Image (cartoon, rainbow, N blue to C red):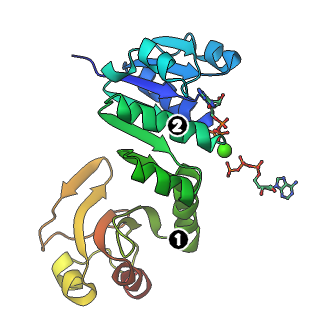
Amino acid sequence: MKKEFAVIGLGRFGGSICRALSEEGMEVLAIDIDEDKVNEFANIASHAVVADTTDEAVLKSLGIRNFDHVIVAIGDNIQASILTTLMLKELGVKHITVKAQNDYHEKVLSKIGADYIVHPERDMGKRIAHHIISNNVLDYLELSDEHSIVEIAANGNIAGHSIMELDIRAKYGINIVAIKRNKEIIVSPQANEVIQSGDILIVIGADTDINRFEKKAL
Ligand code: ATP
Ligand code: ATP
Ligand code: CA
């Protein structure tokens, strides 16, 4: 059975989620309080409705509890975002993703039981900052305050050497979980795998260790 999604708030963030889900062939109900926004999505989403989601009766009449996943992408109106999330939770929606506007908003959302809280501006900002500080870091995923998974471009200093020769785990305490080579991906590479120039290493470890590896080995 096809999964059914509902996106509440069709600003840049919610709108982009709505488009991407629709392009993937998903059933999407697009909801906004603003009629112009809804009209914009009438031909993109499976259904598009004008509704104020802070009104419980409205949420019930939309049958919102039957959706597999509801995304709350109301931005500036934090009160509306919180109220909507609270009612979705009370109505028994199984998966709720909410965009947080700031840290306080995030705290409240996690208290009322939002399943996934995203902070796109903050996270994208961090990601881009990492990218511009280090020439070799292509992308990163924060696992905790101190641990990450990072994509690092291999350069001439390590190309031509095997993982064993470089002794990466012993010297830096980090693990190479995969190597991207052209269109290929080598998952859990063996110690005798020779790094080639142009390889992208996906490494996991403590941020301090990953930094050390970037500075010393590359
Ligand atoms: P983005 O950064 O993603 O563009 P934003 O931070 O600018 O979004 P807003 O424009 O404040 O966020 O909100 C996103 C959408 O949520 C708007 O189109 C707005 O009309 C809609 N919205 C706000 N309140 C409600 C509500 N109570 N019910 C339904 N939709 C709402
Ligand atoms: P975000 O989505 O990243 O939270 P936003 O969409 O709300 O940002 P704006 O409010 O338009 O974006 O602008 C972000 C910041 O840029 C604000 O702090 C604002 O004061 C500042 N800003 C806007 N215009 C100018 C300008 N011409 N010169 C300097 N700062 C500006
Ligand atoms: Ca914004």
Relative height, residue 183 to residue 129 (above, below)? above
Q: Quadrant of the N terminus?
A: top left
Image-based side of 116 in relation to 131, left or right: left
Q: How far across and how far down the image is residue 193, in percent?
A: 17, 69
Q: How far across and how far down the image is residue 44, in percent?
A: 53, 15
For the residue pair 5 and 163, the one nearer the viewer reads as 5
For the residue pair 39 and 203, the one nearer the viewer reads as 39
Q: Quadrant of the C terminus?
A: bottom left
Q: Residue at x 65, y 40 (%)?
A: 77
* Disc 2 from disc 1: Cα separation: 43 Å
The answer to which quarter of the image holds residue 150 is bottom left
Graded by Cα atoms within 10 Å as few (under 14), some (14 to 19) or many (20 or more), the crowding at tag 1 reads few
Asked if the beta carbon under badge 2 is closer than 8 A to the nearest atom of ligand 1, the reply is yes
Secondary element type, mark 2: helix
Image-based side of 1 in relation to 16, left or right: left
Q: Residue at x 58, y 59 (%)?
A: 125
The answer to which quarter of the image holds residue 173 is bottom left
Mark 2 lies on residue? 83
Mark 1 lies on residue? 135
Q: Residue at x 48, y 53 (%)?
A: 108
Q: How far across and how far down the image is residue 145, in percent?
A: 39, 72
Three-letter amino acid code at disc 1? Asn
Relative height, residue 178 to residue 10 (above, below)? below
